[in-house]
């Protein structure tokens, strides 16, 4: 096996591990990086004193790390693999250290127990060399008595420390259990996750991993249990934990209890132990179970039964990461093996490891006598009594049920066979999956990774499940016989569609048992599920009537009508050429998958005969099933589909052939590169839309770039299954700058003249393409073609500078500057043409020379913010992959980034609001709920500015606004009437005039209400129904408008003005109030004013003076002192004027100063130009405010030398 970045990504247990590993891909974090053959190892310095030792084997992706992570592989293993794949340079060739040698030795001993498995995975020469080196190192090493004694003492010390840590953790656990009992189990069942998470983390720290796992799994087990049985399960599990804790504290060195509390012994210790029970016999594989745990590990359990004397069972457990996919078991159910087993120490030994396996020839020579399957009465009941007496915490005891059938006597269920084995109602609930799968013929659930498979006496099919396995099995074996006659239950017929997967089954059970849907509603659900290829499981819900259900349930209707003694029809229900038309498309996919497992040759003939005539989507679905059991015999079948009409089918077939090694490497590389892109049909305009998939790691980008450098444009077209190069280039969507750059390079190097011309015409509108890429592409153009493109480049409203420069090379004399509409492009071209151009007052100089018109600067005084900041919104939409509330353009995190600002890729998002980020997060989170938002604050705190940007970012439209005044009436809030239409046609939708609020409800967008408190109280209350019921009644039409997802209201109000209307208590409850404060920090306020003034000056075409920051600081110093009522040093108390002197007023003062400086003072800001505006902002009351200003000038400003010009000018004006 050779690792690639894609394989490493597949190995990762989750995205969080990938992100954590990405931070460790730095050689400085790894003091040691070495390799030897296929072995690669390193030491990563963590937070502790000792570094984490990490090793992996490149030949088979085996790995080991000493970190305490419960994820497999951990972030250290992923990071080490990534670094080695991306750049093996830092890895030095070295000798194997002792810890790597020990790991190799353990892997060799615990390797595959199956000869077939060993033959499948022979080690590579490098791996064989590493293994031989490890074995030689172990063989040559002489034991050192002192080292052995020291190692033994260290082991005892660690064991003692572990026991102390576990004891402290168990004390905390017992205290936690007491708290749960005092608080009541009802409260526990309401919130089991948070209650178990805290104590489970504590137990992990205390090294009691087994107890932590029990508590970690408990909430999910409770949620999967019917609500009426959860309390019993909770008491049972917590009681079992109490028993384990008490037993461990009484005997902490007991091996079985140590395994139940902490970690179990490894295989080496069991095999080397002289006290381990060993039993050599012939064993039959009677069952198998595969379970995926919450920590990402897959547990594979194999059950063996002794065919010698007695009825002893053995359990083989194997664990592997879920990221490795499904693994086939080393043994098949029904297989008989001769082996010596070593059992783990326990009161009733059950779990074991294979100590020695006989060879296949010895298996044949071994005399195996057929053993009669033991009925329940023959199984040793004393064993179960001993388990209850000596190990009462045991939750699992195996019990074999003989051939028979489920029958009923009174309210109990029984297994009718040679002896009558009772099945308690609790056992039947615990085995609902088992019962259902048996009743449905064993194959109705086609692909259930966590499923049981077992054999039964006289039953040739291994799908029949007769291995009852639960704590109640001990009760079952001790029950008495039924009092009355048994009434057999006819087996339930198997349906043609598979049952729901486990997670969806739990959701369906909630609908039936918790929400309690009506029969008609459940019928609707069954139709929806049948359309998606699923049926309900009989143990989840058995319909009473079938008239409203889909036809796929008709076998169940017949089953309910048959007599109790009737038998199931034995006719073959497999799909074939004769009954092909009677199968639904979803049924065919499942049936062919089953046929390929049972009769692969018949399946290949059926697919080759029937599939080519199906629609493209159905062909693709059936071809996807071929990947499950792919073999060399499928090659001829696949080659017949290489020229399929569907591009997706051709791509899938090429991938299958590449997996089989039936195609060249170049074809597989083309397929791999094509997988980095998505091809979708355009519904409205027709044609295709080709976009680059979002990549998560640098390694993926590097791999895509390496493949692009090898491939031609023509092979890329074939990989995407497109007709020609023209279709590729005209359908390309520029969403990834690196991907477009790769396309440009590929086209420039291998594309046709027509392809180069098409891409050159489109690339001028692409952002972020490097000048080198443009140079490669435009070098392919002739002078005539370049001259044709030059006007298009120069006259573009938003020209790409690189395209302008490259296209203009050698054509400087032909450029007519009157063609230009953009100043930056002119500057770039003139600079390259060798003409120096000053940037001091560039725009005014160009206007004076007539190089472009004033109208081209801007056509409107102020555009909506979604237009002004279109670039920011476009970048965020392209890169936003987080979940979005329904109706939102951006995710809540992206909305906050848009308003606060930040770096997104290479693009810098402009900050629209400078202040506390938590305020904006609270406001955005409010709008994601059904509560409206009210922004409060004194005038000039950017309430309207923030609400406008929120509406633009969330809905893409900030223009749905209602300005509330004292004259605003209900018609301006709800709706009005076109009286001409009203008189002509009467009340109708055509005569109705929709308000912004009305349109926002219809479209599912945000509506803005400015200065809400200025509107009359009776009109304010019009909003109560809209905000609470999310509907607007129209009584004239006997109709109503119901708000769509995404609708909400943002209102603003200030708490400073007098004479406003207070909100009613009912209306206040429907708003979440967020207060926007004035800036506390002078530097922050200077930043806000400077940025906003610059934006407004640009829109007014005013040049920006040099001394902006200095004058802003002086004006704000005056404003802040008068506003706060004290000087900056806090020594002098001042009187505050009636004006708010907010940040917004400071911006207005500075913009007026800009205008005065531009037109009357040679572009220089001065106190003479700003002082009149400062005076107008402060003096609102000609008597009181004037006196306050005079006092401030004489007591404060007069003493400051740096404010002398302001003092003299303001004194003169006053």
Image: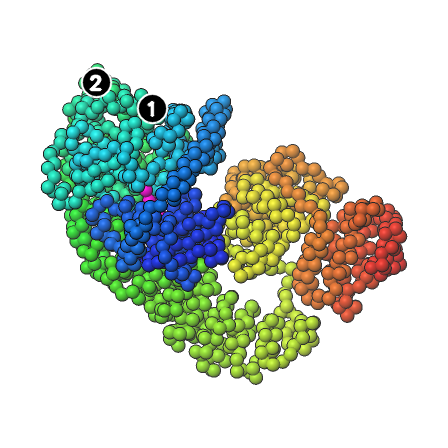
Instruction: Locate residue 937, reporting x and y percent.
Output: 69, 44
Instruction: Locate residue 1173, reporting x and y percent.
Output: 79, 57
Q: Residue at x 34, y 37 (%)?
A: 265
| Colour theme | rainbow
The residue lying furthest to the bottom in this view is 813
Residue at label 2? 481
**Viewport quadrant of the N terminus:** bottom left
Q: Residue at x 46, y 62 (%)?
A: 736
The residue lying furthest to the top in this view is 483
Nearer-the-camera pick, 924 or 122:
122
Q: Is residue 1032 visible?
A: yes
Nearer-the-camera pick, 161 or 625:
161
Q: Is residue 1073 left or right of residue 270?
A: right
Nearer-the-camera pick, 754 or 832:
832
Residue at label 1? 392
Magenta span of residues: 319-323
Q: Residue at x 21, y 58 (%)?
A: 635
Membership of 320 in magenta stretch: yes
């Amino acid at each position: 096996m050779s690792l690639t970045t894609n394989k490493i990504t597949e190995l990762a247990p989750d995205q969080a591990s990938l992100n954590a590993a990405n931070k460790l891909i730095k050689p400085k974090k790894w003091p040691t990086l070495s390799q030897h053959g296929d072995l690669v190892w390193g030491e990563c310095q963590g937070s502790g004193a000792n570094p984490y030792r990490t090793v992996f084997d490149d030949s088979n992706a085996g790995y080991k790390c000493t970190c305490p992570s419960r994820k497999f592989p951990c972030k250290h293993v992923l990071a080490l693999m990534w670094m080695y794949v991306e750049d093996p340079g830092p890895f030095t060739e070295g000798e194997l250290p002792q810890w790597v040698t020990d790991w190799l030795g353990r892997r060799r001993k615990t390797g595959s127990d199956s000869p077939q498995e060993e033959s499948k995975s022979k080690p590579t020469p490098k791996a064989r060399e590493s293994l031989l080196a490890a074995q030689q190192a172990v063989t040559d090493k002489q034991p050192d008595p002192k080292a052995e004694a020291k190692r033994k003492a260290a082991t005892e010390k660690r064991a003692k420390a572990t026991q102390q840590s576990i004891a402290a953790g168990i004390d905390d656990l017992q205290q936690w259990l007491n708290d749960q009992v005092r608080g009541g189990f009802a409260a526990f069942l309401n919130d089991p996750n948070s209650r178990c998470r805290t104590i489970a983390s504590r137990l992990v720290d205390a090294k009691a991993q087994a107890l932590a796992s029990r508590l970690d799994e408990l909430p999910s087990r409770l949620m999967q249990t019917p609500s009426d049985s959860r309390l019993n399960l909770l008491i049972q599990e917590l009681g079992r934990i109490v028993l384990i804790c008490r037993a461990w504290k009484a005997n902490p060195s007991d091996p079985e209890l140590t395994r139940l509390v902490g970690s179990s012994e490894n295989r080496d210790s069991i095999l080397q132990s002289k006290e381990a029970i060993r039993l050599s016999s012939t064993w039959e594989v009677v069952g198998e179970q595969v379970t995926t745990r919450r920590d990402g590990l897959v547990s594979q359990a194999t059950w063996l039964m002794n065919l010698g004397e007695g009825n002893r069972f053995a359990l083989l457990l194997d664990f592997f990461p879920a990221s490795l996919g499904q693994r086939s078991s080393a043994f098949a159910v029904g297989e008989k093996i001769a082996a010596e087993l070593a059992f783990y120490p326990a009161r009733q030994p059950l779990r074991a490891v294979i100590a020695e396996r006989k060879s296949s020839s010895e298996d044949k020579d071994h005399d195996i006598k057929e053993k009669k399957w033991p009925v329940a009465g023959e199984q040793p009941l004393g064993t179960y009594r001993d388990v209850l007496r000596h190990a009462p915490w045991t939750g699992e005891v195996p019990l074999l049920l003989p051939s028979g059938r489920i029958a009923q006597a009174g309210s109990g269920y029984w297994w009718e066979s040679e002896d009558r084995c009772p099945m308690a109602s609790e056992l039947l609930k615990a085995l609902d999956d088992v019962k259902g799968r048996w009743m449905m013929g064993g194959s109705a659930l086609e692909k259930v990774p966590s499923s049981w498979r077992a054999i039964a006496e006289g039953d040739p099919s291994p799908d029949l499940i007769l291995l009852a396995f639960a704590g109640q099995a001990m009760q079952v074996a001790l029950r008495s016989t039924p009092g009355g006659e048994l009434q057999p239950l006819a087996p339930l017929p198997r349906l043609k569609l598979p049952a729901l997967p486990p997670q969806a089954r739990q959701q369906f059970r909630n609908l039936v048992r918790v929400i309690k849907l009506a029969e008609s509603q459940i019928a609707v659900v069954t139709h929806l599920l049948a359309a998606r290829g699923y049926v309900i499981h009989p143990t989840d819900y058995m319909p009473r009537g079938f008239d409203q259900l889909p036809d796929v349930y008709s076998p169940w209707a017949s089953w309910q009508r048959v007599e109790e003694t009737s038998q199931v029809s034995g006719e073959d229900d497999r799909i074939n050429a004769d009954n092909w038309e009677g199968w639904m498309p979803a049924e065919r996919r499942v049936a062919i998958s089953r046929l390929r497992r049972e009769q692969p040759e018949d399946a290949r003939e059926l697919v080759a005969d029937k599939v080519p005539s199906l629609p493209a989507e159905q062909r693709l679905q059936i071809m996807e099933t071929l990947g499950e059991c792919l073999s060399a015999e499928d090659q001829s079948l696949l080659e017949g589909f290489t020229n399929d009409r569907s591009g997706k089918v051709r791509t899938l077939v090429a991938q299958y052939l590449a997996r089989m090694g039936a195609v060249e490497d170049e074809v597989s590389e083309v397929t791999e590169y094509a997988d980095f892109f998505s091809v979708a049909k355009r519904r409205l305009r027709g044609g295709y839309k080709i976009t680059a998939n979002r990549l998560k790691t640098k390694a993926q980008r590097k791999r895509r770039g390496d493949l692009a450098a090898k491939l031609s444009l023509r092979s890329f077209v074939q990989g995407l299954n497109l007709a020609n190069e023209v279709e590729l280039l005209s359908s390309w969507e520029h969403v990834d700058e690196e991907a477009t750059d790769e396309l440009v390079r590929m086209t420039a190097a291998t594309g046709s003249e027509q392809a180069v011309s098409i891409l050159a015409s489109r690339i001028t509108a692409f952002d972020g393409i490097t000048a080198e890429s443009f140079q490669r592409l435009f070098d392919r153009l002739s002078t005539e073609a370049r001259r044709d493109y030059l006007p298009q480049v120069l006259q573009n409203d938003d020209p790409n500078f690189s395209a302008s420069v490259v296209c203009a090379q050698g054509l400087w004399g032909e450029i007519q500057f009157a063609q230009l509409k953009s100043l930056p492009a002119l500057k770039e071209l003139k600079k390259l043409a060798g003409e120096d151009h000053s940037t001091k007052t560039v725009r005014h100089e160009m206007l004076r020379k007539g190089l472009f018109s004033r109208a081209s600067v801007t056509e409107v005084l102020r555009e909506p913010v979604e237009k002004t900041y279109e670039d920011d919104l476009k970048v965020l939409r392209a890169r936003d992959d987080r979940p979005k509330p329904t109706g939102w353009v951006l995710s809540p995190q992206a909305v906050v980034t848009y308003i606060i600002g930040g770096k997104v890729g290479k693009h810098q998002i402009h900050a629209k609001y400078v202040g506390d980020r938590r305020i904006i997060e609270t406001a955005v989170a409010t709008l994601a709920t059904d509560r409206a938002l009210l922004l409060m604050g004194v005038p000039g705190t950017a309430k309207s500015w923030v609400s406008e940007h929120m509406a633009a970012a969330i809905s893409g439209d900030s223009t749905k606004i209602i300005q509330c005044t004292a004259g605003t009436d209900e018609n301006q809030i709800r709706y009005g009437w076109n009286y001409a239409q009203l008189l002509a046609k009467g009340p109708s939708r055509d005569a109705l005039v929709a308000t912004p609020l009305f349109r926002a409800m219809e479209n599912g967008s945000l509506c803005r209400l400015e200065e809400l408190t200025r509107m009359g109280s009776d009109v304010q209350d019009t909003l109560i129904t809209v905000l609470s019921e999310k509907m607007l009644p129209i009584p004239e039409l006997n109709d109503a408008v119901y708000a769509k997802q995404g609708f909400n209201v943002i209102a603003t109000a200030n708490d400073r003005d007098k004479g406003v209307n207070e909100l009613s208590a009912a209306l206040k409850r429907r708003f979440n109030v967020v207060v926007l404060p004035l800036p506390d920090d002078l530097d922050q306020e200077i930043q806000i004013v400077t940025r906003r003034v610059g934006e407004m000056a640009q829109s007014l075409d005013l040049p920006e003076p040099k001394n902006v920051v200095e004058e802003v600081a002086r004006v704000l110093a005056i404003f802040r002192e008068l506003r706060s009522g004290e000087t900056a040093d806090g020594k002098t108390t001042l009187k505050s004027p009636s004006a708010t002197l907010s940040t917004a007023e400071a911006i207005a003062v500075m913009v007026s100063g800009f205008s005065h400086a531009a037109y009357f003072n040679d572009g220089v800001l001065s106190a003479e130009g700003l002082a009149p505006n400062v005076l107008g902002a402060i003096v609102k009351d000609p008597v009181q405010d004037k006196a306050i200003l005079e006092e401030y000038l004489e007591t404060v400003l007069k003493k400051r030398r740096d404010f002398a010009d302001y003092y003299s000018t303001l004194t003169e004006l006053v």
